[in-house]
Image: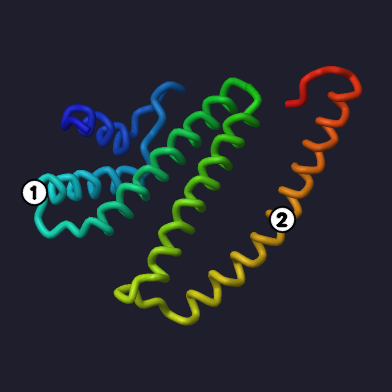
Amino acid sequence: MSCGRYDWVMSRATSSEPRSPTHVAVSPPLAKAITELQRVQKVLLRGEDLDPHILADFREALNRVRNAAWSAQQYLASKATDQDSTSVLAILAGERVRAAYQLCQTIREDLKSPEVKFQKRQLIQLHLAAKALTEQLGEVVGKLESDRSHSRAASRTTGTPAV
């Protein structure tokens, strides 16, 4: 982020003057995050003592935040214009699924590594959450597969292609 843009954002965050609908205030936590990210940027540019695994985790976390911010912005825009926000919510849900998949892959690698030490309680909590999610996913995926097979059967009898 350039200093000029940052200065503008920060001035908007701390300004008490009224804003038009196109100038949304930056909340103090976001302003603080911007400052912290600029500090982190300087550390990254120096390139000193960067652990590749931590850097990859950091990049993934930034990607999730970026996508969540974009989704939130789209959601607010759709609400402000009384448009249907369903597609934005679907995109956000899809992003959560993608992030969960990435985290699962990373945790699988961590579990194989003798260098990573987990706390027993954390692993138990994760196991319980994963078990509940697996059961719920099984139900949803089963329903999706059932709907899909019914759609195929219907298309064979009507001659229309299945989706």
- Image quarter where the C terminus lies is top right
What residue lies at 9% left-to-right and 55% top-to-bottom?
48
**Where, by quadrant of the figure, is residue 109 drawn?**
bottom left
Q: Position of residue 113 (x, y in %)?
A: 35, 71
**Where, by quadrant of the figure, is residue 62 drawn?**
top left
Q: Position of residue 110 (x, y in %)?
A: 38, 67
What residue lies at 81% left-to-right and 37% top-to-bottom?
149
Please state if 156 lies on the left or on the right of 53 as rendered.
right
Q: Amino acid at mark 2?
A: Gly
Q: Nearer the viewer, residue 144 or 121?
A: 144
Q: Position of residue 122 (x, y in %)?
A: 48, 75
Spot the residue most to the bottom: 120
Local secondary structure at mark 2: helix
Q: Position of residue 153 (x, y in %)?
A: 86, 31
Please state if 154 lies on the left or on the right of 3 as rendered.
right
Instruction: Assess disc 1: are there few (<14), some (14-19) or many (≥20) residues with their C-alpha within 10 Å of its C-alpha.
Output: few
> Taking 154 as reference, is 14 above or below it?
below
Task: Identify the residue position indicated by label 2 in the image.
Answer: 138
Instruction: Assess disc 2: are there few (<14), some (14-19) or many (≥20) residues with their C-alpha within 10 Å of its C-alpha.
Output: few
Local secondary structure at mark 1: helix
Mark number displayed over residue 30: none
Mark 1 or 2, nearer chain start: 1
Spot the residue most to the right: 157
Please state if 71 lies on the left or on the right of 87 as rendered.
left
Of the residues tagged 1 and 2, which is closer to the observer?
A: 2
**CA gap, disc 1 and disc 2:** 47 Å
What residue lies at 58% left-to-right and 42% top-to-bottom?
93
**Where, by quadrant of the figure, is residue 91 drawn?**
top right
Q: Is label 1 in contact with label 2 (beta carbons under 8 Å)?
A: no
- Image quarter where the N terminus lies is top left
Please state if 76 lies on the left or on the right of 44 as rendered.
right
Task: Identify the residue position indicated by label 1 in the image.
Answer: 46
